[in-house]
Image (cartoon, helix red, strand yellow):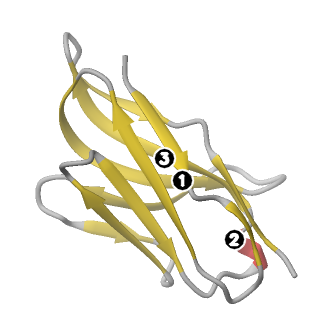
Amino acid sequence: QVQLVESGGGLVQPGESLRLSCAASGSIISFRTMGWHRQAPGKEREFVAAINWSGADTVSVKDRFTISRDNARKTVYLQMNSLKPDATAVYYCTANLRAVNLGYQDYWGQGTQVTVSS
């Protein structure tokens, strides 16, 4: 069984930074991509960033957000700098990976709350 566990969320003031982590575990054979989505109160879930596991290609829709990965730890990070209140949301880790006896599928974590407020 595959699990994605996020950590690093919390309450920060505007202008501060935060780094989210997401560790994948279980009977994983290989990854294609890992990434982050978020859902703010009253809004639809939206894409934030993604990283290709083999080529280190990254995509981010937020200029102050940087995604990176640690292959050995099966972990993806989201560095968020100069946070603004509109970054307040639940951040979800995502992964497209292949597990034992399964083809490539999408997986989601439970989410971690990020609140930016003074």
Q: Quadrant of the N terminus?
A: top left
Which residue lies at the image location 18% right of the left edge and 49% below the top edge? 72
Indicate left or right for 31 with 116 as reference.
left
Location of residue 26 in the rendering, given as x and y in whole percent from the top left corner? 31, 24
Location of residue 110 in the rendering, given as x and y in whole percent from the top left corner? 60, 36
User: SS class of the residue under badge 2?
Assistant: helix
Which residue lies at the image location 72% right of the left edge and 82% below the top edge? 84
Which quadrant of the figure has residue 66?
bottom left
Residue to which mark 1 is pinned: 37
Residue to which mark 2 is pinned: 87
Which quadrant of the figure has residue 67?
bottom left
Q: Which amino acid type corresponds to the residue marked 2 in the rendered image?
A: Ala
The disc at residue 93 is 3
View extreme (right): residue: 118
Q: Which amino acid type corresponds to the residue marked 3 in the rendered image?
A: Cys
How far apart are the alpha carbons under marks 2 and 1?
12 Å
Location of residue 4 in the rendering, given as x and y in whole percent from the top left corner? 44, 36
Label 1 crowd (10 A; few <14 / some 14-19 / many >=20) = some
Location of residue 35 in the rendering, given as x and y in whole percent from the top left corner? 40, 53
How far apart are the alpha carbons under marks 2 and 3?
16 Å
